[in-house]
Amino acid sequence: MAKIIPFKAVKPTRAIVGLVAARPYQSYTVDERESRMDYNPYSFLHVVNPGYKYSQEVTGNERYKLVRNRYLEFKEDGIFVTDQKASFYVYKIVNRHKQVFSGIIAATSAEDYENDIIKKHEETIAKREQTFKNYLQTVGFNAEPVLLTYPDNTIISDIIEDAQKNHAEFEFTMTYRDTHYLWKIDNEETMAIIQEEFKKMKTIYIADGHHRSASSFLLYKDEKQKNPDHNGSESYNFFMSYLIPESDLVIQEFSRLIKDLNGLTKEEFLIKLDANFRISNCGTVPYHPSKPHHFSMYLDGEFYSLYLRKANYKFDTALDKLDAQLLYKTILQPILGIDDLRNDSRIEYVHGKHEMITIKTSVDSGQFKVGFGMCPATVQQMKEIADEGLKMPPKSTYILPKLRSGITIYEY
């Protein structure tokens, strides 16, 4: 039974929300960040990059304290305003490719995370979890929701659709050409119906934001232990999430670029591949796989199709069927000697609809020796892997929608 609750969001005013909202801090180059901060005093980047004010890079706990100061200044200056009543928020994104995502921003339960009602499919790094937990404890807010997905539900969809018939509280378009809309749901009866529908769900799934949810869970454990009067209603028992139906979730693939053939010649490499794959040389004609367990490869100026010889490979778990795992177990690890997909400097990842062009350009430049493409994972695969308690390899999925920071803020 999934538990969600309404909360009093801290939000920018309608007049400036488009100036405040920002992509995640790490997604900007240094030049991009500085350019936006030079010309936009309202950008949320000023909050999360407080050293800009002093033309100095600050890190660790000193940075966290300054983030807290900048956030309070934004509230004092009226840039951020706290809602008077706990609410759910219908949030719609229409991206530059006209893909539409509609869901509900709510506070989700840390206990549900602990009890595996909120399922995970991605491995997290303990150091990153701890770092972000410390950040949350110091700054006292979370400005970017975790992306969760739930089974399509007619009642919830009807509520979302009805809300969108009203005038949106927010409607703005970013320079990235994605348009954002926000509606508030504060009717007690409607909120109770939403909560009841989620209670009927045995599981919901993290689509994106595994480290944020893991850090929020660590915060919950810490604060619960420190609080002798803990009763389960405190804000630290929950974390902000954007919940969208499975049919709205879009999963794209990451392609792999490898810097060398692990000491093999081209011919030796192809012979080793032949043990597990049926190989066809497509010449200079780009090939992109259209079926699971089919891969594209670009090597030495030529495209290849690789079809798995299924008789040589066992599908014992849901993870075994995932193409990113299959590529790792049959090529990257045994032939190319890449054991650590997260930290090995010999591998890089690319995504996007032009990834085959990127692969070709990168290999032709000599920076990389070979590139591989694959079909994207499905939502069903993601769920099955999570249900079995397994974890996907790094960069197995590129999830849409991508969320913005600073539109709704959850305070601890």
Image (cartoon, rainbow, N blue to C red):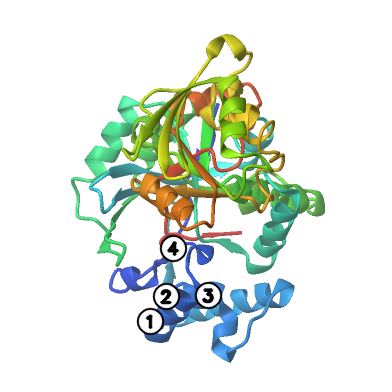
The furthest residue to the bottom: 54
Res 13 → quadrant: bottom left
Pointer 3 and pointer 1: residues touching (CB < 8 Å)? Answer: no
Quadrant in the picture for the C terminus: bottom right
Question: Mark 2 or mark 4, which is nearer the start of the sequence?
Answer: 4
Question: Marks 3 and 1: which is nearer the front?
Answer: 1
Distance, label 2 to label 3, CA atoms, is 8 Å
Question: Marks 4 and 2: which is nearer the front?
Answer: 4
Of the residues shown, which amino acid type is indicated by label 3?
Val
Pointer 4 and pointer 2: residues touching (CB < 8 Å)? Answer: no
Question: Mark 4 or mark 1, which is nearer the start of the sequence?
Answer: 4
Distance, label 1 to label 4, CA atoms, is 14 Å
Residue for badge 3: 47
Distance, label 3 to label 1, CA atoms, is 12 Å
Label for residue 43? 2
Mark 4 neighbour class, 10 Å CA radius: few under 14, some 14 to 19, many 20 or more: some
Q: Is residue 228 left or right of residue 326?
A: right
Of the residues shown, which amino acid type is indicated by label 1?
Asn
Q: Residue at x 54, y 52 (%)?
A: 368
Q: Is residue 212 left or right of residue 8?
A: right
Q: Position of residue 152 (x, y in %)?
A: 37, 27
Residue for badge 4: 23
Q: Residue at x 59, y 26 (%)?
A: 271
Is residue 288 at all visible to an observer of this figure? no
Pointer 2 and pointer 3: residues touching (CB < 8 Å)? Answer: no
**In this view of the protein, which residue sits in the foreground, 91 or 32?**
32
User: What kind of element bears circle 1?
Assistant: loop
Pointer 1 and pointer 2: residues touching (CB < 8 Å)? Answer: yes
Res 19 → quadrant: bottom left
Quadrant in the picture for the N terminus: top right
User: What kind of element bears circle 2?
Assistant: loop
Label for residue 40? 1
